[in-house]
């Protein structure tokens, strides 16, 4: 195979595999939420993301993490799920 074709193809496949392993979170509520992310089980402090109503964040928790809303609702994700915030709860979208 021609090297000029192979290099871009490998780069495209690598980018697709990284995005396939990242979590997507969307806020379906009418209010903003603060989403805490803990990437390491030994970590005590969480990284915080503000999600405005109707917004979505992609490419987080590539290796999995614990997500927590300000309400205390918490879930663990492995790195490839789609998560939705509905009525103040984190829900893994099964679709």
Image (spheres, rainbow, N blue to C red):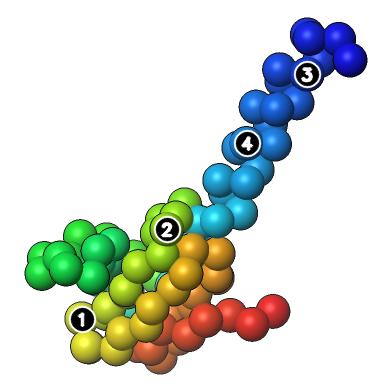
Q: Is residue 13 left or right of residue 4?
A: left
The Cα atoms of the two marked residues, 4 and 3, are separated by 12 Å
Where is 90 relative to 67, above or below? below
Packing grade of label 4 (10 A; few <14, some 14-19, many >=20) is few
Packing grade of label 2 (10 A; few <14, some 14-19, many >=20) is some
Q: Is residue 85 left or right of residue 16?
A: left
The Cα atoms of the two marked residues, 2 and 4, are separated by 16 Å
Between 31 and 72, which is closer to the camera in this rendering?
72
Task: From the image, tell me which residue sits under label 2.
Answer: 63
The Cα atoms of the two marked residues, 1 and 4, are separated by 35 Å
Q: Is residue 27 left or right of residue 93?
A: left
Task: From the image, tell me which residue sits under label 1.
Answer: 70
The Cα atoms of the two marked residues, 2 and 3, are separated by 28 Å
Q: Residue at x 28, y 62 (%)?
A: 39
Q: Residue at x 31, y 85 (%)?
A: 74
- Indicate the position of residue 19 as horizontal and vertical percent values: 57, 49
The Cα atoms of the two marked residues, 2 and 1, are separated by 23 Å
Which of disc 4 and disc 2 is earlier in sequence?
4
Which of disc 3 and disc 2 is earlier in sequence?
3
Between 34 and 19, which is closer to the camera in this rendering?
19
Name the secondary structure under disc 4.
helix
State which quarter of the image contains the N terminus.
Answer: top right
């Amino acid at each position: 195979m021609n090297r000029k074709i192979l290099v871009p193809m490998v780069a495209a496949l690598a980018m697709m595999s990284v995005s396939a392993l990242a979590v997507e979170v969307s806020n379906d509520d009418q209010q903003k939420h603060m989403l805490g992310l803990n990437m390491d089980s030994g970590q005590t402090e969480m990284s915080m993301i503000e999600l405005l109503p109707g917004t979505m964040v992609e490419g987080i928790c590539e290796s999995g993490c614990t997500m927590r809303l300000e309400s205390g609702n918490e879930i663990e994700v492995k790195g490839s799920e789609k998560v939705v915030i509905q009525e103040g709860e984190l829900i893994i979208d099964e679709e």
